[in-house]
């Protein structure tokens, strides 16, 4: 059989989860320069809508009425409504679930905390049956979550979920003991900022160093305070608060956005014209976003009545988007925006197609997702929408430092909005490049330097935090002295591994990778169909029913390349055989440098 270069594309397989890690392009040329791969089709993409850098959308969980279906990654019958999910830089997602059915008495319900990410997760904590999940949650870099539970009255309690121990404990904030906690926000160091409500008065307070600390109070609590009212605050990992505060007796005429430090100092970030005659703004939405650099993002109304998305640190103020009936963004919805540490702002808007979510920064305005867009779900291709004029999104979006956006959206089957698919929590992943990376493994053999000067590592079993092969029993290394045709590096194909189940590479940064796979049969007259196997990455079959003998015959290099979009974390290649054990002679993983 002639050894040549033949390109074939494998279509995506059916899959249960959405936003799969693997693209399905397949092309020949193992020893071509690493990362020089062509573009490939990808599963889990937004199938309609404006072109954007958000082509990968992954379903995390879905709730629906039990009469319709059981939902996804939730106990059947679980319900959430108008929630704001959150996401950290590791892609971990958390959100409150208002109703989780009791396992013994299905007529009783608990409030729950959902925790997961990258298309997997579930309920990690449930409260008592008489409690309510009364505020949205927050998540820090470690995956720890701050949330509250209420007994149904005006009081509630503050809780912290520890991702490392998978336990939730009540947080005591003495000497600050409010009637209720609102909007708890957990910082990287584990401290939690919150709005402390005392009867009719409000304060900005935080749990720091094992105790509660008050930053600022309104006039009801402190007659000497200049603030007649403190609106919903935001807290960052620098230990700072930002809050909209009123200084007029009617709570609305004179307002400003201020930054508050733990030492009691504060500074003005923005003010309306009634407070500062030089200000171009007459009003601000009540809730806004705040990042670790001390920058806020807020929807403001200018004195000319134009609504604008404003970003400011108190020194530099930028109007990122101006809503206009003739522009891309026709209006803003009344939900808080979200800002990451890079200054990107995610927000809900209305465009020509209806409700949508956008991301803006200094240089761009990108549509993430919107009404009528089609997305992959656990039930198949779905469409974002409602059976009537109800809102298609619930709560506000959140954004991490990579630009990934988490949001909730109502769903129905493609083209049929009269069938309820409930509400899904999705992550839209921003396109980004991984840092330069190459791992080349001489599978079943020792260290080797090829004709191009590429070093191939000696093969070894997997250990946590590293890379290597995984075997259910004992993997078997095989070798031959016979020449291997079709490659300038025959030695690379003269060793191989069999009787293994997978290769695992831990802590691989998110990005686009070319995965080169090399195979060789060690007999000249190998029988067609004698060894057929498949390779899977995540839920995606990237090589299906592969037969080296059919591809190149015996004693010849079979060279394949697969392009994958990796979400970050462990990359696992699973091998499964039909008649005999799979083989692998060479494996290389490298960042794609041009597409």
Image (cartoon, rainbow, N blue to C red):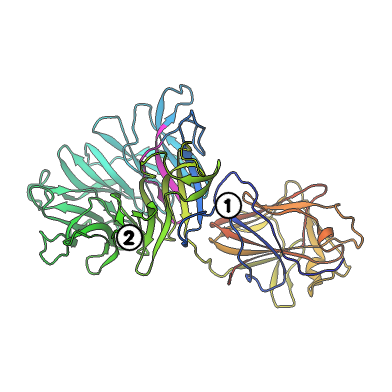
202 displayed left or right of 69: left
* Secondary structure state at the residue bearing disc 1: loop
The total of numbered circles placed on residues is 2
Q: Which residue is mark 1?
A: 20
* Marked residue nearer the N-terminal end (1 or 2): 1
**Residue 395 location, x and y as percent?**
35, 45
Q: Are marks 1 and 2 in contact (CB under 8 Å)?
A: no
Magenta range is 80-99
Q: Give the crowd class for mark 1: few <14, some 14-19, many >=20 residues within 10 Å.
A: many
**Residue 341 location, x and y as percent?**
36, 62
Residue positioned 34% across, 30% down in the render: 131
**Residue 298 location, x and y as percent?**
26, 57
- Image vertical order of residue 400 relative to residue 15, above or below: below
Camera-side residue: 286 or 49?
Answer: 49
- Image vertical order of residue 210 relative to residue 590, above or below: above
- Image vertical order of residue 420 relative to residue 186, above or below: above
Q: Give the crowd class for mark 2: few <14, some 14-19, many >=20 residues within 10 Å.
A: some
Camera-side residue: 170 or 525?
Answer: 525
Query: Separation of disc 1 and disc 2 at Cα?
Result: 31 Å
**Residue 338 location, x and y as percent?**
34, 55
* Secondary structure state at the residue bearing disc 2: loop
Residue positioned 78% across, 68% down in the render: 492
């Amino acid at each position: 059989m002639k050894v040549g270069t033949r390109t074939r594309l494998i279509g995506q397989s059916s899959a249960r989860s959405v936003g799969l890690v693997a693209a399905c392009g397949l092309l020949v040329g193992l020893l071509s320069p690493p990362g020089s791969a062509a573009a490939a089709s990808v599963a889990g993409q937004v199938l309609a809508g404006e072109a954007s850098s958000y082509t990968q959308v992954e379903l995390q969980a879905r709730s629906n009425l039990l009469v319709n279906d059981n939902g996804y990654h939730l106990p059947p019958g679980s319900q959430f409504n108008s929630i704001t999910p959150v996401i950290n830089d590791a892609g971990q997602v958390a959100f409150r679930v208002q109703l989780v059915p009791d396992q013994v008495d299905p007529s009783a319900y608990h409030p729950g905390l959902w925790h997961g990410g990258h298309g997997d997760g579930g309920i990690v904590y449930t409260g008592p049956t008489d409690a309510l999940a009364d505020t949205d949650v927050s998540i820090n870099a470690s995956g720890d979550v701050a949330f509250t539970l209420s007994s149904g009255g005006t009081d509630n309690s503050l809780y912290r979920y520890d991702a490392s121990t998978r336990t939730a404990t009540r947080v005591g904030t003495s000497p600050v003991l409010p009637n209720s906690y609102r909007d708890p926000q957990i910082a990287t160091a584990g401290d939690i900022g919150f709005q402390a409500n005392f009867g009719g008065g409000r304060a900005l307070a935080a749990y720091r160093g094992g105790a509660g600390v008050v930053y600022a109070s309104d006039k009801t609590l402190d007659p000497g305070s200049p603030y007649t009212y403190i609106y919903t605050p935001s807290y960052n990992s620098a230990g700072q608060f930002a809050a909209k505060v009123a200084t007029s007796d009617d709570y609305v005429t004179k307002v400003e956005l201020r930054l508050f430090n733990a030492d009691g100092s504060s500074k003005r970030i923005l003010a309306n014209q009634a407070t500062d005659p030089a200000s171009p703004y007459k009003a601000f939405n009540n809730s806004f976003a705040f990042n670790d650099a001390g920058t806020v993002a807020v929807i403001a109304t200018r004195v000319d009545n134009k609504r604008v998305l404003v970003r400011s640190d108190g020194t530099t103020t930028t109007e990122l988007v101006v809503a206009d009936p003739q522009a891309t963004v026709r209006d803003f919805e009344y939900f808080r925006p979200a800002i990451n540490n890079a200054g990107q702002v995610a927000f809900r808007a209305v465009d020509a197609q209806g409700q949508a979510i956008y991301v803006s920064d200094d240089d761009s305005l990108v549509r993430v997702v919107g009404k009528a867009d089609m997305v992959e779900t656990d039930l198949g291709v779905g469409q974002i929408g409602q059976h009537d004029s109800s809102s298609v999104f619930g709560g506000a979006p959140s954004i991490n430092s990579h630009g990934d956006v988490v949001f909730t959206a109502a769903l129905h089957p493609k083209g049929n909005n009269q069938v309820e698919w409930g509400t899904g929590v999705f992550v839209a992943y921003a396109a980004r490049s991984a840092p330069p990376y190459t791992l080349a493994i001489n599978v079943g053999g020792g260290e080797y330097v090829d004709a191009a000067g590429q070093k191939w590592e000696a093969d070894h079993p997997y250990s946590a935090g590293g890379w290597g092969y995984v075997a259910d029993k004992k993997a078997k290394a095989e070798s031959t002295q016979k020449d291997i045709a079709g490659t300038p590096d025959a030695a690379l194909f003269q060793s191989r591994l069999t009787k293994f189940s997978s290769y695992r590479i831990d802590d691989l940064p998110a990005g686009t990778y070319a995965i080169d796979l090399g195979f060789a049969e060690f007999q000249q007259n190998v029988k067609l169909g004698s060894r057929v196997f498949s390779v899977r990455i995540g839920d995606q079959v990237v090589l299906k029913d592969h037969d080296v003998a059919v591809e190149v015959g015996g004693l010849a290099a079979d060279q394949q390349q697969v392009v994958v979009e990796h979400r970050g974390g462990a990359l696992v290649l699973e091998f499964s055989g039909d008649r005999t054990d799979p083989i692998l002679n060479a494996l290389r993983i490298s960042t794609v440098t041009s597409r």
